């Protein structure tokens, strides 16, 4: 994995868990919402194997929160997403794409409902705070919009339930997917949600005091030793296998939810006003011009700093672009997401990929990486 | 200068000049508006000495543009800044802090007026595009707001005028400060502005086609050899000496223009509506609680990844924070910006700085680094 040396400055924010991350030997990072996100301790491959079997502790403080609170909070949340948020109970979270008036995806947060009139948008990598502040100001809504001092720590992997039961109590086994509860750990209030950026199960612990990072980390660290706990991170291999899309790579403001295969998270007929209603109705009617697909690329492992490779159709026509890619130990294949002209995007479609000059055959698969339609 | 290894991905955008930057041996980077910004080729010190005498070519593509175009463009631009933009002529740029309804600084761009109803905001490191899109949507303004394919290349240093005259023509010597002209270089349209993030003079060339980065770079590179041109970058030492503040480090959304010593860029009595009017009037009346000051820290050179050091007043009271810091060859001293409680912020005020455990005496200086009031 090639890297560039990055200078830190006050412009790029430290995570509350940074000291523990460095002590545990993090060897490569990225920046996400202007905060360092450790990605690799030893290698993607060893971390992948461990994550599939045991339990990991992840510094995901960079998943920043945008708090919306006040009498118009629900009205504002409804306005910015085509998902029906009136159905989200207090104590529940929902994955909800945010879309602008053109249907373009601004971000794809989990929206947590903390109270009837109070929400956190647990965001991917784009400045949702500024966008929502702008909309709220422009509409004259009676809300406060700001980034609170909240820094998630993820506990991920098949042994996460046992670890959380030991640390917090057996009742945490009953937390439903994307729901959360309030607890106190290390003397500091946290919210514990059943969520996280892997398909291996687990929790995200929303620390609400950035000065308590070490204390929170240490409690899970000590209790986790019997479960072979390691420091880990969102894992490229695992997330592509699982089908988790990364905002900024697999979808951007130039994508819409139909392209990005997010149709099941839309409630286009919801009652509340939302700004993308007309645009999304139009796109749905005409069908999206491009589609984000699962692609298997033939041959041995590929590697790249960015994997922004052209995808070609018949007669070498440029029909799209690879957006994420990894070598999958499970499938023993190069698996990828790619954004492809719709006429080339059906399962079974045979294409080619120009991987930095290395021309490879590639085939569109379904969401379970199978070669037949779902 | 300590660094962390950074993994690139499609989420972090390449600059059109990246190939030339790597070929020229860039050794340390930062991320700015989700784009790589090379900061060091050999060292800050050697680059500083060279910049003071010769001319440098800088990849500053990360200074992204936010285009605002349409019938309501001026109305929108006026709304988001307390500076009077009605006085900005077509062909002229103005440094203009953007402030929200609380007076908080969203960014401090140079705003270029391209036409009566068309502007570029040449931004520092925050997602102004999303904020302005939100405001424009909320107010129902008749404008388009987007990030165009524009990537500035800076030519900086005392020999920049000679180099630009050789490449484009003698008439470029007459471009006034922050004004710009349209030209064609390497067959591609550019705007050439007399501006740049140093106090040593020079230009920014706004490339309007990201595929032409190498071609534009090479033309200046070849013509610049007789002027001892080198690849360079915004230089920490030079910019602190010159007094250039960095958004995200020296000011944030939690600062206001009075704190940040930007009062001379405000036209609080301007006729047009602007969203920070009430908040800024209130802050002006009461006086800011904190002030960004120039600080000289005693003793030999200090170093730090972040230099976010506490500043102490009498009886060890915490009175503020260092926001940027460098060893100045010109002053043979550690020079810094710091945000300080107003009652400790007068020129001559004697404080102390805790530089990662190293306690040093520090004195507030004026904007020219003198120990007497300006």
Image (cartoon, coloured by chain):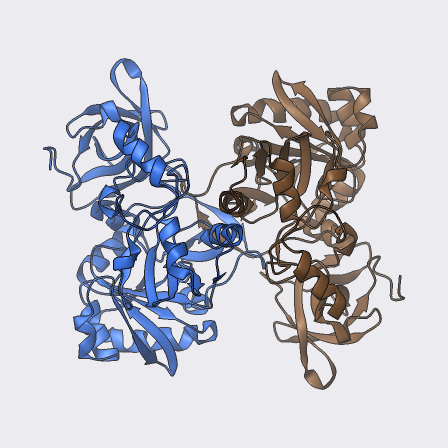
Chain colours: A blue, B brown
Along the horizontal axis of the image, is B265 left or right of B218? right
**Is residue B245 positioned above or below B349 on the image?**
above
Where does the C terminus of chain B fall, quadrant-wise?
Answer: bottom right
Q: Percent from the top left, x then y, of residue A38?
A: 40, 57
Q: Is residue B97 above or below residue A182?
A: above
Tell me which residue sits at (29%, 28%) in the image.
A340
Closer to us: B191 or A51: B191
Quadrant of the snapshot with the N terminus of chain B: bottom right
- Name the residue nearer the viewer: A318 or A280: A280
Taking the spot 35% from the left edge, 24% from the top edge, the residue there is: A357
Examine the rendering and report whether any part of residue A302 can be seen.
no
Residue A167: x and y in percent read 26, 79
Kindly tell me whether residue A304 is visible in this rendering: yes
Which quadrant holds residue B279? bottom right
Q: Residue at x 82, y 27 (%)?
A: B173
- Name above or below for residue B44 compared with residue B313: above
């Amino acid at each position: 994995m090639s890297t560039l040396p990055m200078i830190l400055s006050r412009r790029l924010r430290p995570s509350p868990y940074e000291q523990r991350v460095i002590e545990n030997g993090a060897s490569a990072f990225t920046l996400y919402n202007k905060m360092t996100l450790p990605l690799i301790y030893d290698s993607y491959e060893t971390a992948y194997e461990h994550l599939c079997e045991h339990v990991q502790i992840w510094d995901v403080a960079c998943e920043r929160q945008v708090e919306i609170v006040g009498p118009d909070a629900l009205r504002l949340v409804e306005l910015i997403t085509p998902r029906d948020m009136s159905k989200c109970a207090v104590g529940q979270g929902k994955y909800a794409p945010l879309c602008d008036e053109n249907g373009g995806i601004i971000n794809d947060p989990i929206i947590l409902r903390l109270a009837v009139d109070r929400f956190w948008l647990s965001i991917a990598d784009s400045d949702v705070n500024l966008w929502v502040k702008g909309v709220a100001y422009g509409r004259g809504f009676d809300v406060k919009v700001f980034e609170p001092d909240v820094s998630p720590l993820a506990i991920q992997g098949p042994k996460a339930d046992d670890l959380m039961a030991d640390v917090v109590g057996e009742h945490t086994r009953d937390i439903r997917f994307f729901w959360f509860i309030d607890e106190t750990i290390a003397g500091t209030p946290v919210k514990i949600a059943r969520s996280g950026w892997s398909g291996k199960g687990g929790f995200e612990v929303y620390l609400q005091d950035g000065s308590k990072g070490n204390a929170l980390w240490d409690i899970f660290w000590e209790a986790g030793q019997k479960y072979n706990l390691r420091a880990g991170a969102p894992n490229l291999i695992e997330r592509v296998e699982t089908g988790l899309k990364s905002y900024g790579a697999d979808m951007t403001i130039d994508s819409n939810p139909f392209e990005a295969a997010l149709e099941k998270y839309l409630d286009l007929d919801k009652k509340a006003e939302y700004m993308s209603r007309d645009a999304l109705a139009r796109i749905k009617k005409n069908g999206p011009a491009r589609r984000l697909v699962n692609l298997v690329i033939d041959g041995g492992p590929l590697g790249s700093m960015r994997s922004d490779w052209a995808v070609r159709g018949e007669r070498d026509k440029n029909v799209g672009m690879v957006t994420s890619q990894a070598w999958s130990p499970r499938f023993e294949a190069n698996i990828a997401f790619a954004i492809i002209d719709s006429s080339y995007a059906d399962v079974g479609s045979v294409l080619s990929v120009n991987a930095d000059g290395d021309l490879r055959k590639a085939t569109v698969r379904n969401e379970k990486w199978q070669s037949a339609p779902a």
